[in-house]
Image (cartoon, rainbow, N blue to C red):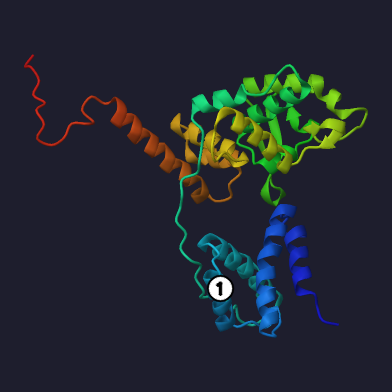
C-alpha cells in the first residue's frame, strides 16, 4: 500500500509543529498547485525533480499569479520536501537551490491615533452588540492580537485583577499581554451584558453573537467593515488594528524586542518593519515642526546678531 506522504506531513505539522487550522489550510492550498502539476506530468509529487519544479513555478508566474503567491507556494513546497528528506524518503532536496521571486516590501497600513479614537467611538454602546464591538476593538488596539487570537479567546483568558490576557498564538505558543485600563473597562461592561447574547446557551468563547454562537474572524471582518464604511475609512482590514498598535508603540518609544514579545513574532526581523514606520514618522514630524527643516540651499537665513 502506497504511503500517504502528504497526510503524514500534515499530521507532523499539526501534532509536532502545532500549526493552526488556518495555516494548514494555506499549506494544503499551496501543495495542491504542485499536485495538479504532478498529475499533468504523470509523476508523483515526491518524484518531481528540480527541473520539474522550476518549470512548475515558471508556469505559475506566467499564469498571472503574483510574486508573493508564487513565493508562498515555494515556501510551502520547501517544507514538504525537507520533511521527506528528514524522513529518508528522498535522498536530495529538489528545492535546495531554487530561489523564491523577490517581493516588494510594503509598509503596513495603519490608522492614526485620531482615526483610532473615531473607530473606538463608532459602536452604539447602548446595545449589547455595540458594547461587545467596542470591547473587541478596544482589546485589539490595546494588545495587538491577531484576529484569530481574539476570536479564540475564552472568558477565562482575561485576568481582570492583574490586567493580563493569556493568548495562544501561532504554533499554539502561549504568551501574556498586559491590557490597558480603557480596554479592561469595556471588557467589564461586556461581561455584564454577554448573557444577553447567549440566550440560555453556554459557550466558552469570550466573544459571541446572537444565539450564543461563536464569533469567528469572518464575522469580525464584517463588523469592522460596517464601521469603516460608516466612518469613510478605506482599505481597513482586521490586521490594520494590529499594525496600528505596533506602529503607535514604536512612535512613542517602545523598543523592538518588547514589541516582538507583545506581537508574538518568532523572528525579530518581522518586527523591524515597525522600526521603519517609526523612522518615517520622525522624519515627517521633523519636516513639519523644525523651523529650519524646509530651508533650501542658498536661501537667506541670516539672523540678527545677539
Q: Residue furthest bottom?
A: 42
Residue under circle 1? 57
Q: Quadrant of the C terminus?
A: top left
Residue 305, relative to residue 88: is it above or below? Answer: above
Residue 249, percent across and down?
Answer: 50, 32
Name the foreground residue: 96 vs 47. 47
**Residue at screen point 56% across, 23% down:** 118
Name the foreground residue: 224 vs 304. 224
> Position of 269 compared to 42: left or right?
left
Graded by Cα atoms within 10 Å as few (under 14), some (14 to 19) or many (20 or more), the crowding at tag 1 reads many
Residue 65, percent across and down?
Answer: 55, 64
Question: In which quadrant of the rendered view does residue 292 lie?
Answer: top left
> Position of 202 compared to 190: left or right?
right
Residue 185, relative to residue 38: is it above or below? Answer: above
Residue 237, percent across and down?
Answer: 60, 41
Can you see residue 9? yes
Amino acid at each position: 500500500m502506497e504511503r500517504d506522504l502528504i497526510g503524514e506531513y500534515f499530521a507532523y505539522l499539526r501534532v509536532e509543529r502545532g500549526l493552526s487550522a488556518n495555516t494548514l489550510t494555506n499549506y494544503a492550498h499551496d501543495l495542491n498547485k504542485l499536485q495538479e502539476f504532478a498529475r499533468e506530468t504523470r509523476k508523483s509529487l515526491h518524484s518531481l525533480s528540480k527541473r520539474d519544479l522550476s518549470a512548475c513555478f515558471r508556469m505559475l508566474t506566467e499564469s498571472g499569479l503574483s510574486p508573493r503567491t508564487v513565493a508562498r507556494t515555494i515556501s510551502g513546497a520547501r517544507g514538504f520536501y525537507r520533511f521527506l528528506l528528514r524522513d529518508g524518503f528522498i535522498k536530495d532536496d529538489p528545492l535546495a537551490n531554487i530561489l523564491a521571486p523577490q517581493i516588494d516590501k510594503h509598509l503596513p497600513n495603519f490608522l492614526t491615533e485620531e482615526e483610532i479614537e473615531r473607530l473606538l467611538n463608532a459602536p452604539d454602546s447602548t446595545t449589547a452588540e455595540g458594547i461587545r464591538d467596542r470591547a473587541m476593538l478596544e482589546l485589539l488596539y490595546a494588545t495587538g492580537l491577531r484576529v484569530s487570537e481574539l476570536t479564540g479567546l475564552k472568558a477565562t483568558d482575561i485576568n481582570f485583577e492583574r490586567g493580563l490576557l493569556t493568548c495562544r498564538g501561532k504554533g499554539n505558543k502561549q504568551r501574556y499581554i498586559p491590557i490597558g485600563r480603557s480596554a479592561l473597562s469595556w471588557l467589564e461592561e461586556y461581561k455584564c451584558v454577554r448573557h444577553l447574547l447567549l440566550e440560555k446557551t453556554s459557550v466558552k468563547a469570550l466573544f459571541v453573537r446572537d444565539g450564543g454562537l461563536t464569533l469567528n474572524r469572518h464575522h469580525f471582518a464584517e463588523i469592522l467593515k460596517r464601521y469603516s464604511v460608516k466612518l469613510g475609512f478605506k482599505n481597513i482590514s482586521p490586521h490594520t488594528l494590529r499594525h496600528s498598535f505596533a506602529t503607535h508603540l514604536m512612535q512613542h518609544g517602545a523598543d523592538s524586542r518588547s514589541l516582538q514579545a507583545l506581537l508574538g513574532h518568532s523572528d525579530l526581523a518581522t518586527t523591524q518593519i515597525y522600526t521603519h514606520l517609526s523612522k518615517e514618522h520622525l522624519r515627517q514630524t521633523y519636516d513639519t515642526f523644525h523651523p529650519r527643516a524646509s530651508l533650501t540651499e542658498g536661501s537667506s537665513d541670516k539672523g540678527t546678531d545677539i
